[in-house]
């Protein structure tokens, strides 16, 4: 079970990192976004 949760957390971490970069660009283009 723990091994199954590890990749999940890794994917979430990668997704969060990607979203942060995208949100930063959206911030400049659209305006303030909740973080």
Image (cartoon, rainbow, N blue to C red):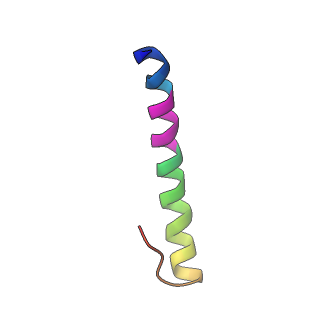
- The relative height of residue 30 versus residue 13 in the rendered view (above or below) is below
Q: Percent x, y for residue 2?
A: 40, 17
* Quarter of the image where one finds residue 34: bottom left
Residue sitting at x 57%, y 74%: 26
Magenta span: predominant SS is: helix
User: How many numbered marks, from 0 up?
Assistant: 0
Q: Percent x, y for residue 9?
A: 44, 33
* Quarter of the image where one finds residue 1: top left
Residue farthest bottom in this picture: 31
Residue 27 lies in the magenta-colored region: no
21 vs 32, nearest the viewer? 32
Residue sitting at x 55%, y 71%: 25
32 vs 25, nearest the viewer? 32
- The relative height of residue 33 versus residue 10 in the rendered view (above or below) is below
Residue sitting at x 41%, y 67%: 35
First to last magenta residue range: 8-14
């Amino acid at each position: 079970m723990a091994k199954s949760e590890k990749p999940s957390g890794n994917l979430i971490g990668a997704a969060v990192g990607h979203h942060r970069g995208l949100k930063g660009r959206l911030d400049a283009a659209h305006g303030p976004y909740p973080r």
